[in-house]
Amino acid sequence: MRSARLTLALDSGAITLPETGRIHVFRPRTGDDLSVLPKDRVIIITGFRPDYDAFAAAGYAVTVCATDEAAAALVCLPRSKAGARALVAEASAGVVPGGPVIVDGQKTDGIDAMLRDIRARADTSIPVAKAHGRVFSFPAGPVFSDWAGVETVTEDGFVTMPGVFSADGPDRGSRLLAAALPARLPGRIVDLGAGWGFLARAILARDGVRQLDLVEAEAAALDCARRNVTDPRARFHWADAVSFRPEGVIDAVVCNPPFHVTRAAEPGLGAAFIRAAAAMLPPGGTLWLVANRHLPYGAVLTETFREVEDIGGDGAFRLVHASRPVRARR
């Protein structure tokens, strides 16, 4: 979809790229076809580890933060409005004044609203519509500096950033899971998909914990977690939770898995987290999990753990304690 729109916009002359210079591409997703852009000039900018690894494996230059000025930029619109605005500000600040900043996205991710907001501040190219989305450009400049991502502090005193999950404060599922954890926990625990550290702080407040590994794929969220969790027992890993493997033996996993990348629910994500948790646990290991009740995790839980117990929740969320992971026969 993105490739079709970009190709049409460039071939029609609706958008023109400079003949030389770097092209910053912000937050493309794994599977995005960027072949319409000159690969030797493209620098992928993303803090999401699975996308970072995928584009690096495909031979692209990849970085978490841009350091050099670019001739042009492409913003692949995320679904978070605050995160999208922060990317537009970052892209515009990193391109030579007047250079093209291209914005591409699906209607379901708010591209129409973003177009209206940018048009209120800058001249834009004629939008090209295709495949349920739009692409357009505007000239780089300082007019979007007030959209720049700045940290916020929640009512509970946690530092967060625009675009990270539940940036306004702990989500209800995490609060329920934190309250349900027993007063004493095993010695070594993995917080799988740790976000900005709310559950980690709750885990470390329990007796018995000797080491906690916070595993988070989103670099910005993990940076916040480092500030929110200063306990020396905490270790931080910028990693894809699905492929992460701890060093040595762990005792338990605590997890509030994601279930969407776009606005549509993708239960396979949470199922992959559950399988990853089971794979990293020893035969006597345990999992504490919170998930939306409407998500079909029952089958994967019984496939991967011999004992699965509901331990509470509410009308929207299910709390699960699973133990004795099933080992695949060799």
Image (cartoon, helix red, strand yellow):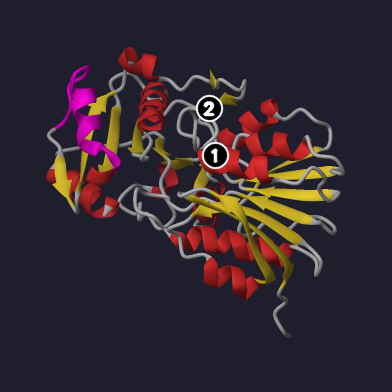
Q: Is residue 300 left or right of residue 92?
A: right
Q: Residue at x 51, y 45 (%)?
A: 61
Q: Which residue matches tag 1?
A: 63
For label 2, count other residues whose C-alpha is less than 10 Å away and answer few (under 14), some (14-19) or many (20+): few
Q: Residue at x 39, y 55 (%)?
A: 265
x, y percentage for residue 115?
A: 21, 30
Residue 115 is one of the magenta-drawn residues: yes
x, y percentage for residue 274?
A: 61, 62
Q: Secondary structure at mark 1?
A: strand
For the C terminus, the image quarter is bottom right
x, y percentage for residue 163?
A: 45, 33
The answer to which of 235 and 10 lies nearer the viewer is 235
Residue interval drawn in magenta: 109-125
Q: Is residue 18 visible?
A: no
Q: Is residue 324 left or right of residue 104?
A: right
Q: Which residue matches tag 2?
A: 67
Q: Is residue 186 left or right of residue 125?
A: right
Residue 240, disc: none
The answer to which of 128 and 109 lies nearer the viewer is 109
Q: CA distance from mark 2 to mark 1?
A: 9 Å
Q: Is residue 43 visible?
A: yes
Rendered view: 90 above or below 320:
above
Which residue type does callout 1 highlight? Thr
Q: Residue at x 81, y 66 (%)?
A: 284
- Whether label 2 touches label 1, CB < 8 Å: yes
x, y percentage for residue 236?
A: 72, 40
For the N terminus, the image quarter is bottom left
Residue 118 is one of the magenta-drawn residues: yes
Q: Secondary structure at mark 2?
A: loop
For label 1, count other residues whose C-alpha is less than 10 Å away and answer few (under 14), some (14-19) or many (20+): some
- Quadrant position of residue 323: bottom right
Which residue type does callout 2 highlight? Thr
